[in-house]
Amino acid sequence: MAMVSDFHHPYEPYDIQLELMRCVYTLLDSGKKLAVLESPTGTGKTLSLICSAVTWLRDNKAEFVAGAAGTRGAVTGRASDSGCDSDSDDPAWVTDAHAASVLESKLHGIGDYESVLAKLKKNSSAHALTFATAQRHSHARRQRKIAHLDVSTDDDSVFLPQDYVSDSEDTSVSAPDRIDQIRNEVSALLAGLDQESRASQVDQLQLFNPVKIFFASRTHSQLNQFASQLSLPHFASSFEKYNIPMERVKYLPLASRKQLCINPSVTKLNSVDAINDACLDLLKNSKSKDANRDANKCGCPFYKSASSNVNSGLLRSFQDQTFVDIHDIEDIADIGSSLNVCPYYASRSAILAAEIITLPYQYLLSQTTRESLSIDLTDSIVIIDEAHNLLDTINSIHSSEISLNDLKKCYGGLQIYFGKFRTKLSANNRVSLIKLMKLVDSLIRFIVKNFKKPGERIDSNFLSSDSNADTLNVHKINSFIKKSKIAFKVDSYNQSILQEQSVSSSSQPIIFKVSSFISCLSNPANEGQFFFEKGHTIKYMLLEPSKPFESILEKARCVILAGGTMQPISEILDNLSSNIPREKIEVFSCNHVIPDKNLETFIVKDSRFEFTFEKRDNPKLIEDLFDFYYTLSQSVPRNGGIVGFFPSYQYLEFVMKSWKKSAHFCKLNSNRAIFYESKSDSDPFHDYSTHVAQGKSAILFAVVGGKLSEGINFQDNLCRAVVMTGLPFPNVFSGELLIKKNHIENKILNNGGSKQVANKAVKDFYENICMKAVNQSIGRAIRHANDYALIYLLDKRYGNANINSKLSHWVKSRIKPQSSINDIMNSTKKFFFQH
Ligand code: SF4
């Protein structure tokens, strides 16, 4: 494709945004397989990704259509037309003319569909505000109402596997009149259209949509933020040359049942697992033979509409409403409500026609989930945002743990349930439930007998030594749990007892935790390991995150890993890209959008500051630390907040206690109000930010990896100076770290590597965890183009080349030569004098 100059960015892009957009466009165009892109927070990363990727997508689509126009059979769908027609007796001009006419009619379908969407948009835009507002109010009302619904225990049969009957649907929460009116208008408009021709219009969308973009992020709010950014640019139509000047972005946000379910009898449940199981249980009922005869066994009425033929009017309406505009997850739930169709299942029918699909990490990173949702990544562009924690996320999605306490509680819950329902259960269920209880009991006895210390490996057949458990078939028990939804039944029953006793229930039902652990036990991966963790816990962990990622890389055309702080990038490349040739990988690190003069980094190399485990409690160091913070608090303008990060809650508490014992705490507190995080208290951010907003001088001490080190913006006066006290190395005695360390060592030694190489790899592994956390925490200080702040790395070890190389590029490039406290404080005053 030609060099692109217009990425349809809605604003005048900064140079660094242009660089990032050019990089994304070029890497997509040149067939790179994997890209790691670092663009600091506040630089408009998401919008730049959207503009470049969608511009490429549309250009690619235009080329595809042009290619189709010049290639017989590419769009006719006839095998004989797709280049295998050498046997055809027709002269070339005849088949060319045929292909041209087929293409024209298919493009006509695209144009017609855009007209349908335009009409819908016109029709609904007059009501857009009232519609959205009414829906939101309806949703809020529904939520309030749901919160007060009780689980009735009058009919015990609802807690029995197979025979579960849902609470009757709460018809009193139907949408308000206004929504009904709009729904009728939409239905009237749709009814006037020929369903068959509309089905074919949507098929054309799929045909001319050779590449999709899948965008995954960590949180619901990040995905909704993507939707709001996507609505800003206006992209050129891929079909401009064919008289279709307007092409809407076909955007679909996929979300979980917890976010999309509209059945009040299910949404009242308090955990994701319970909602999933309750829904599946209802669907099983809806498929049973009794469903047609017995109103109580009708399953979910919203599913019935969503599961009918894919070309049905309702599903089409859902898809059309979805594509009329850029909708966020709540909008999708509202569209489902207004059409009385399950938005969770109806969304799936729109996947094929969508151009851009957003989805939570779990949906993308688990192959089983992708398959169950019919998400096909073949030839797609996969963008994973906030990818700095990708390795941890892959590991945690494929990991599970269970403690002795959890197991005991679970066993107690199963006993109560069994005592209540033993005579009502079918023979099969009774036997299976007894086996499940036996398995839980065996796990309890195994931990009691064998737990010695965290980090001890456990063989995956560890239960075979238990005479009680060796006859148990874990696969069968796992299958019983899955098919009978027994976890949901037991949890529902136990919740109902707690409600009767007015005891608040746990938001994470133990029985689901046990069930997920048994699932790992029944099918452990070759790259997984069971081991003991502190708290008398057995943990299962995946040791090679590359395995689940391989299937994504294999299928996708290109995978882009993007984040504000991706350093150390070597960690990601070493773990995820071993099978990809280097020339197929792109690494790009963007500068910050702020001018150089707005950020300076100081490494305090003073030999007094070395916060190693052995030295950090030294009273002299604690005194020097106070001196540093006190001097700094006098050098930073009073209205500018200071944020000091500490490596752990324990160390921060120790320092605060030490300062309180002397007069130091009072002295600093009288200069600047001190706020600090503690494990037990609610986070102090609210009070700190209120203090700063009132122009009062304040200092906040936070913990790396704590409540304030991710997700909170310390923009402007909230943070004019950020200090990283020491290096936040992870706890090397945790079971998880010990197991990973052994795995890294063994892998190198087993492949013929030396002990020296293995030691270096382990050292790198610890340093990477530490520096990722440092980059995340200090990256909170600068949040937009006009922001300014100073960064202090308070430990002489930050001067080591290895550590230093793992700092974010935009932090490292601004390191100042000053290293003595005096020089640093003088530069500090000078910096703030200039701002
Ligand atoms: S089918 Fe849809 S609406 Fe019905 S229970 Fe399941 S998720 Fe909820």
Image (cartoon, helix red, strand yellow):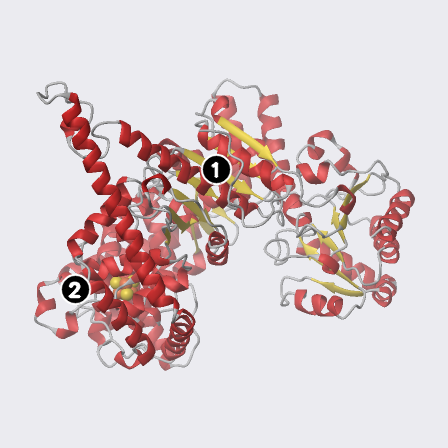
Q: Residue at x 73, y 68 (%)?
A: 693
> Residue 332: x percent and y percent?
36, 62
The answer to which image quadrant residue 771 occupies is top right
The N terminus, quarter of image: top left
Q: Secondary structure at mark 1?
A: strand
Counting every numbered tag in the picture gives 2
Q: Secondary structure at mark 2?
A: helix
> Residue 222: x percent and y percent?
50, 54
In the image, residue 277 sits, relative to residue 382, either above or below, namely below
Q: Which residue is mark 1?
A: 560
Q: Amino acid at mark 2?
A: Ser
Q: Which residue is mark 2?
A: 286
Mark 1 to mark 2 CA distance (whole Å): 41 Å
Q: Residue at x 36, y 36 (%)?
A: 62
Q: Earlier in the sequence, mark 1 or mark 2?
A: 2
In the image, residue 178 sits, relative to residue 539, either above or below, namely below
Q: Is residue 802 left or right of residue 489?
A: right
Q: Nearer the viewer, residue 72 or 483?
A: 72
The quarter of the picture showing ligand 1: bottom left
Q: Nearer the viewer, residue 595 or 426?
A: 595
Q: Residue at x 77, y 34 (%)?
A: 799
